[in-house]
Amino acid sequence: MIGKLTATATLLLLTGCGQYYWSRPGASYDDFAADERSCTQSVGVPVQGKSDQVLLPQDPFRLYLKSRGWTRGWQQYYPPPGWYRGHEDEGPFVLR
């Protein structure tokens, strides 16, 4: 019984330590940053009274990046080269 609990706990720890990242073959961080910025400006919903901030609906945001050739995937913390962290909540985010 203890062996099964230990195995289950170990499996949960190994699979639970990660986040979603974005990748596109041959793309650099600058490519990702430019596409993410463009996406945020295109699909972001302005925050009333704060002209430099938007709320970011996740489905349109993800579809926009996918339309630019990006793939979203689960990676361990410290992902391999070529994987970049994007917005994973609705914000608000400051437009840059």
Image (cartoon, rainbow, N blue to C red):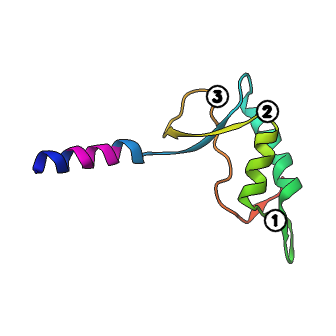
Q: Does the image show residue 33? A: yes
Q: Amino acid at mark 3?
A: Gly
Relative to 93, 80 lies left or right? left
- Residue 47's place in the image compared with 84, above or below, is below
Q: Calculate the distance from the C-alpha at mark 3 to the C-alpha at mark 1.
A: 28 Å
Where does label 2 land, which residue? Answer: 31
Where does label 3 land, which residue? Answer: 82
> In the image, residue 41 lies at what x, y percent?
87, 54
Relative to 72, 62 lies left or right? right
Counting residues from the start of the chain, the first of labels 3 and 1 encountered is 1
Counting residues from the start of the chain, the first of labels 2 and 1 encountered is 2
Which residue corresponds to the image point at 71% horizontal and 30% vertical from the top-left? 24
> Is residue 9 inside the magenta stretch?
yes
**What residue range appears in magenta?**
7-13
Q: Calculate the distance from the C-alpha at mark 2 to the C-alpha at mark 3.
A: 11 Å
> In the image, residue 2 lies at what x, y percent?
11, 50
Q: Amino acid at mark 1?
A: Gln
Where does label 1 land, which residue? Answer: 53
